[in-house]
């Protein structure tokens, strides 16, 4: 065991006003390390049907996410010479934020997205053909039998959510062409530890990946990590290029990062043990800072009704006694309440209407984009608090 958050509500289980006085489920959230596969993981598996059939997270609400999606699609189309004869699959394809860029260039696509409300936006608003199902061994096999083999297979921020990881990777192997490539993005565990990004831990995220753990996973299914890139998105991610064993050529970058991980002790418990203490210190310091500001008569709110915000607010005990509301520009989240702490979610315009003194940036991973949007709030004297890795008030 590395860290225990006790019992917490589900991070994306936003509440309607009518649900506020109904009992809310709280489930254990404990982080543990497995020395035999060197995987950091939580111990509770919430049934995926419950987490993902109706979802509040729409990838297209971030400009950064869209820019990155467009770049990677353009790059894959160019480097792989993709055209009308090619085929691209994405699992966890959300609202079609990525596949739309292939589709616009005439490359046939298929999204797989279990959230009914999100898949319907992909189909209806972006014309992205989407299977509203969970991807796994069986669906991979079925697509293969139907002849739907992929030149490119994307899985962005989805592996951590999958309970049957081996099933999903076996399914991926089934649908990949022999010369196809899977492009996989995952938040990087090393960055989570180094930058104390403890709030990215919640029930949806079952695993926190190192390259070492992923390498062991793919090898088991006849797949090889050919290349790895570091991305800044979501607090620091890895982008892997994975290919079937026979066609794969491993680049030196992979061996170099595996070596780096061996040096920091990726497969030893000691590399993870100090994390719990550092997380506890953030909780204490953030609580002290907020109480001090409120004690001085300041008014506080939060920016970004992110899932990670739910972990942070609930774990740190930041509720209505300290902050007034949360703003978020996702229209689907507005009018709802954050789980556990029951803070109401409003559109960002509420910042200028009410001019609170401080806004805690819960979506710290989009700091540049959000500061740009909130330029007027800052110009009028509003200030941001960045909670991690060390709680601090941002300079004006
Ligand atoms: P954001 C999500 O986590 C969900 P979350 C998921 N579980 C996952 O794996 C990770 O991403 C990687 C809002 N916002 O992306 C939009 C603004 O209001 O950090 C979002 O509600 N204004 C699949 O939920 C929230 O902030 C803005 O300008 O922790 C950001 O949520 C921008 C850019 C965002 O992820």
Image (tube, rainbow, N blue to C red):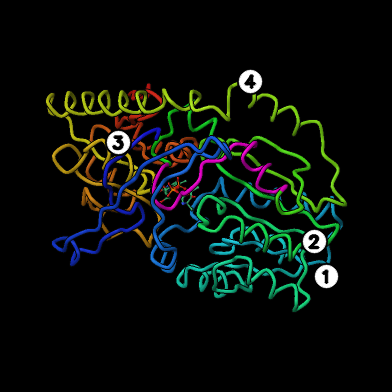
Residue 223 to residue 129: above or below: above
Q: Earlier in the sequence, mark 2 or mark 4?
A: 2
- Residues marked 2 and 4 touching at CB (< 8 Å): no
C-alpha gap between disc 1 and disc 4: 46 Å
Taking the magenta stretch, the answer to whether it contains residue 57 is no
Kindly identify the residue that appears in the image at 64 percent across and 37 percent down.
Answer: 211
Q: Where residue 143 sits: x, y (%)?
A: 70, 74
Taking the magenta stretch, the answer to whether it contains residue 211 is yes
Kindly identify the residue that appears in the image at 61 percent across and 60 percent down.
Answer: 168
Where disc 3 sits, the SS reads strand
Where disc 1 sits, the SS reads loop
Q: Is residue 81 left or right of residue 198?
A: right
Q: Which residue is mark 4?
A: 263
Kindly identify the residue that appears in the image at 84 percent across and 50 percent down.
Answer: 79
Q: Where residue 73 sits: x, y (%)?
A: 72, 54
- Residues marked 2 and 3 touching at CB (< 8 Å): no
Label 2 Cα crowd, 10 Å radius (few <14 / some 14-19 / many 20+): many
Q: Which residue is mark 2?
A: 151
Q: Where residue 334 sits: x, y (%)?
A: 32, 58
Instruction: Give the residues drawn in magenta, as a range.
Output: 201-219
The one nearer the camera, 244 or 97, is 244
Q: Earlier in the sequence, mark 2 or mark 3?
A: 2
Eye-nearest disc, 4 or 3: 4
Q: Residue furthest front?
A: 36
Q: Earlier in the sequence, mark 4 or mark 3?
A: 4
Screen quadrant of the C terminus: top left
Label 1 Cα crowd, 10 Å radius (few <14 / some 14-19 / many 20+): few
Q: Earlier in the sequence, mark 3 or mark 1?
A: 1
Q: Which residue is mark 1?
A: 84
C-alpha gap between disc 4 and disc 3: 39 Å
The one nearer the camera, 151 or 18, is 151
Eye-nearest disc, 1 or 4: 4
């Amino acid at each position: 065991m590395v860290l225990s958050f006790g019992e917490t509500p589900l991070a994306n289980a936003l509440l309607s006003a009518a649900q506020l006085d109904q009992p809310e489920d709280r489930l254990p959230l404990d982080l543990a390390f497995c020395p035999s596969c060197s995987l950091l993981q939580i111990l509770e598996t919430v049934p995926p049907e419950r987490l993902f059939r109706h979802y509040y997270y729409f990838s297209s609400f971030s400009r950064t996410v869209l820019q990155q999606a467009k770049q990677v699609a353009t790059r894959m189309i160019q480097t792989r010479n993709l055209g009308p004869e090619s085929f691209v699959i994405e699992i966890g394809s959300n609202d079609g934020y990525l596949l739309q860029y292939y589709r616009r260039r005439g490359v046939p696509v298929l999204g797989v997205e279990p959230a009914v409300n999100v898949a319907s936006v992909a189909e209806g608003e972006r014309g992205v053909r989407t299977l509203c199902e969970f991807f796994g061994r069986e669906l991979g096999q079925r697509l293969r039998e139907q002849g739907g083999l992929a030149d490119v297979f994307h899985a962005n921020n989805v592996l951590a959510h999958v309970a049957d990881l081996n099933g999903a990777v076996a399914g991926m192997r089934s649908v990949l062409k022999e010369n196809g490539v899977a492009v996989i993005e995952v938040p990087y565990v090393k960055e989570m530890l180094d930058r104390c990004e403890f709030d990215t831990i919640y029930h949806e995220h079952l695993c926190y990946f190192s390259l070492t753990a992923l390498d062991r996973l793919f090898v088991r299914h006849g797949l090889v990590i050919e290349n790895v890139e570091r991305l800044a998105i979501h607090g620091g991610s890895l982008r892997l290029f994975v290919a079937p064993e026979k066609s794969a050529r491993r680049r030196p970058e992979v061996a170099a990062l595996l070596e780096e991980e061996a040096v920091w002790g990726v497969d030893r418990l000691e590399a993870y043990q100090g994390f719990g203490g550092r997380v506890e210190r953030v909780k204490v310091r953030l609580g002290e800072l907020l109480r001090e500001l409120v004690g001085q008569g300041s008014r506080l709110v939060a920016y970004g009704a992110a899932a990670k915000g739910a972990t942070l607010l609930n774990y740190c005990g930041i509720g209505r006694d300290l902050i007034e509301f949360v703003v978020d520009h996702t229209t689907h989240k507005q009018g709802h309440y954050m789980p556990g702490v029951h803070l109401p979610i409003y559109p960002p315009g509420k910042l200028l209407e009410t001019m609170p003194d401080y806004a805690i940036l819960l979506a710290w991973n989009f700091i540049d984009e959000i500061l740009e949007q909130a330029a007027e709030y800052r110009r009028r004297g509003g200030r941001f608090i960045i909670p991690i890795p060390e709680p601090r008030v941002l300079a004006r």
